[in-house]
Structure formats: structure tokens, C-alpha cells
Amino acid sequence: MRGLPRANDPNVLVGFETNDDAGVYQLAPEMALVQSVDFFTPIVDDPHTFGQIAAANSLSDIYAMGGKPISALSIVGFPDKGEPEILEQILSGGHSKMAEAQCSVIGGHSIRNDDIQFGYAVTGLIHPQRVWRNVGVHTGDVLLLTKALGTGVLSTALKKEAASARDLAAAVASMSELNRAASEALLELQDKAASAEPIYAVTDITGFGLLGHAREMALGDRKRGVEAVSMQIDYTAIRYLPGAEKAAREGFLPGGLKNNREFLGDCVGFAEAVPQEFRDLLFDPQTSGGLLIAVAPEFGNEALAVLDKHGVAARRIGVAIPKGKPLIFVQ
């Protein structure tokens, strides 16, 4: 991506320079589009459930920016000899979740493909002055996480027929849950704060795992005058899905987890007391994961309270500190 020319259109408020969750294009002084696209192969056996998860995952980027999704285009890859009933169930599952989000599916595109692939390109609306970026963290900011971790190791255990029905149900419920309530809670907090700025950065936890997305947050953005920070994360403060610790301990580690660990390298350090299975879970790639939020310290408790009011079981998992080595330290 470094070799690609940057957009020079002044209406492009957010491009791909900082690996943000979505792009933002300004239409008017008080209106902008927020756009994202995501699709993947099935991670559960039930096609209707797969469609729901794919939709929730695609919508998540819009919520992470503070936007309201309004329309979506489906993206389908389906085998030439695949059963049409399976495709119908996938589409039906996706439509049900889009309806829950009050986001209209207005078309899409399909191709013949050896593997099933499904997702959406989603468009939302956002105020140009109220865009949450994945960079902007300040020293002292409180780090909040809105969902439990472990979908990657549990999906891998499922493929090996080693996941219990109870554990699978919890993972499916988490992956199918929209990040809408969390986003709406943060918007409410922002409204109540009036002239103060309570929220400095937001991102959703997906393929790069908690530590990968935390790294993106910590790097800052020199062009916008946002200095890099380091992050201290308390692994005991994080929620983990039922069965995730066991799956990690027994070695059901997806390829993406290993890639994340290799990519992050010495950006991450661990206290000796952190067990290996929890180290793995912090690298675990998530599907339709929660929001990682950097909140001004004086708003930390209020943010947790308003999230709880909206039914979001967020946890305070760490704090931003002056930049040092490693960039992220887990204790």
C-alpha cells in the first residue's frame, strides 16, 4: 500500500494511510459517507448463522468510526455445484442482521468460486467533525474493550470437532452481536460531554487480534500531530469466551494467530507471570470482535457506566503511557 498514491481530494477525510476501519468522504459541511467492505469464508457450519456473522462483521467498521450504516451491497462467492438452498440461507441470515441494524441491502454481486465467500460493502453516514479514528491516543487514556476474546481458537477447535456445544453457542452469540449498542453509548457520552472530548480513538478487534489493533492505535499519526504512545494491558481484566482458554492451551491456534505473533515481534512484551495460553489469546484473530476504545481518564468511569446502561459489558483493560520499549506491555 505504501507505493500507492494518496488521494488528493480534500473531501477525503479518512483514507488508508493509518489502516483505519473505514474510509470517510465529506459530502456537505455536516454530512459525510463512511464506507467499508469485508467478506470471508464460513467459520461455522450453519449457513444462516454464517450469514449473520458476516453481516455483523461488515457493519462493525462503520460503528467503530461512529457512523450509522444505511445501505449495503452483498458480495458472494459460491461453488457452481453448490446447493441453492445453502446460499438462500446465507443471504437470509445476512439480511436478518442488516434489518436489525436498520441497514438496507440494495444489491450486490456474485461470482462462481470453489469456496463459499460472503460479506458486504457497507455505507453509512457520519458528521465530519465526529469521526473516531484508530489513532489519537494520549498518555493517560483509559483503554476499554467491549467483547470477550477467543473466536479464532474456538473456530479452529470447531474445525477439529473439539469445541463443545456450549462454547460454540457463546462464540456464535458474540460474533453475531452488533457493535451498534457500544457505538450508540459512546455517541451519548460524547453528547453529554459537550465541549470536552471524552473519546480519543476507537477501533474494532478483528483479524490482527487485540495486540495488533492496539499497536495501530499506539503508533499515532505524525501528519496529524498525534504522537506515539505505549500501552500497558492487564490480561486478567479481559473477558475470554467460555472454552477459549482451554482451546488455546490445547494448541488449537489458527494460522492468523501465528502470523500476528510473528508480525508484531518485539513490539509486544509480556511479564513472566502471563501464562502462554493468555499470550496466545491476545494474538488471536477475532471475527466480529468488540471495540477497543481510548477514553480520557476523567471519563473512564462514566464511559463504563453508559456502556453498561446500553447493555454492553465493557472492561477497563489498560492505560496509555509515554512511548517506550516495548510498544505494548502485557502484565
Image (cartoon, rainbow, N blue to C red):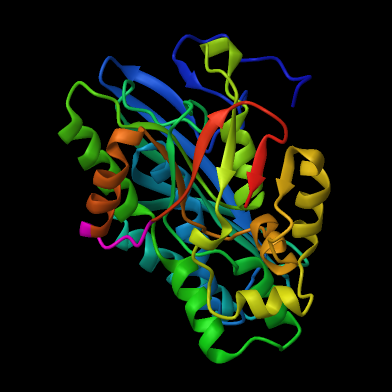
Q: Position of residue 68 (x, y in %)?
A: 32, 42
- Indicate the position of residue 302 as horizontal and vertical percent values: 24, 45
Foreground residue among 161 and 93: 161
Q: Is residue 76 left or right of residue 182?
A: right
What residue is drawn where x is 51% and y is 88%?
166
**Which quadrant of the structure image shows residue 267?**
top right
- Locate the N terminus and report the quarter of the image it occupies: top right
Name the residue nearer the viewer: 223 or 234. Answer: 234
Image coords of residue 87 (percent x, y): 56, 73
Residue at screen point 70% across, 60% down = 279
The majority secondary structure of the magenta stretch comes to loop
**Is residue 262 positioned above or below 34 on the image?**
below
Whether 312 is among the magenta residues is yes
In the rendered image, the vertical position of residue 95 relative to residue 325, given as above or below: below
- Please provide the residue range marked out in magenta: 309-314
* In the image, residue 95 lies in the stretch drawn in magenta: no
**Quadrant of residue 8 within the rendered picture:** top right
Residue at 58 percent of width and 60 percent of height = 287
Which residue: 39% across, 45% down?
63
Residue 325: image location, x then y, percent = 72, 32
Total residue callouts: 0
